[in-house]
Image (spheres, rainbow, N blue to C red):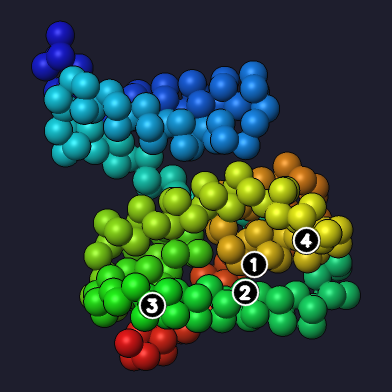
Amino acid sequence: MKEMLTNSVLFGVALTLLAYGVGSVFKKKFKLAIFNPLLIAIILVILLLATFDIEYEVYNAGAKYISFLLTPATVSLAIPLYERVELLRKNAKAVIIGIVSGVLTSLISVLFMCLIFGMSHKEYVSLLPKSITTAIGMGVSEELGGYVTITVAVIIITGIFGNMTAPFLCKLFKIEEPIAKGVGIGCAAHAMGTSKAMEMGEIEGAMSSLSLAVAGLLTVIGASVFAGFM
């Protein structure tokens, strides 16, 4: 039975979707940030693979096809922005300054933390793209000679953490302006944060969509510059 399932190309896809579905059910039932569907899906998949001694390569043979949807899914986030383009024009200066500040904060914080903890150059460049979407971050890490697997893990952790804590942090720091919320979330937590921003409101979602796209492009340039600082 085990061999029949694992030999099927649909095994990885089915397991991934089932695990995410379980996570979504938990989220709807308990309505707590800790029950993030993606986080629960990751934990369930790891537990199942470890329990039944299934190699990651076997699982990924099917699961990798889900990754093909990552790029078009990211591009589709431009739709809410298009619907709010007039709002963007009126606040263009503030949005641009906010995005640039967010990118610089991310890069500078990674630089100082890596210096404090004595990390190697390869580990450092692996962490630089932590706040941009996986589709772009993987390419940046590979180009700079980092550990792509670490980059992917860090990006996912950053996104999940941002998704879980965004509403709380906005309340804690009394950020009430929808544009400010969207820009901050998009710069810090890419697509996963944007999904939370969309739940918070249309304006937040639109600004977060713009921020994750522009922040990704600026990080490509900024990471190349910052890579030489350590």
Picture coordinates of residue 78, whole percent (x, y): 65, 58
Q: Which residue is mark 1?
A: 211
Residue at mark 3 to residue at mark 1: CA–CA distance? 29 Å
Q: Which residue is mark 2?
A: 102
Left-right relation of 2 to 143: left
Q: Earlier in the sequence, mark 1 or mark 4?
A: 4
Q: Which residue is mark 3?
A: 116
Q: Are marks 2 and 1 in contact (CB under 8 Å)?
A: yes
Residue at mark 1 to residue at mark 4: CA–CA distance? 20 Å
Q: Nearer the viewer, mark 4 or mark 2?
A: 4
Q: Secondary structure at mark 4?
A: loop
* Residue 220 seen in the current view: no
Q: Earlier in the sequence, mark 4 or mark 2?
A: 2
Q: Which residue is mark 4?
A: 173
Residue at mark 2 to residue at mark 1: CA–CA distance? 9 Å
Q: Secondary structure at mark 1?
A: helix
Give the residue furthest to the front.
Answer: 116
Q: Is residue 104 above or below residue 83?
A: below
Picture coordinates of residue 158, whole percent (x, y): 49, 55
Q: Amino acid at mark 1?
A: Ser
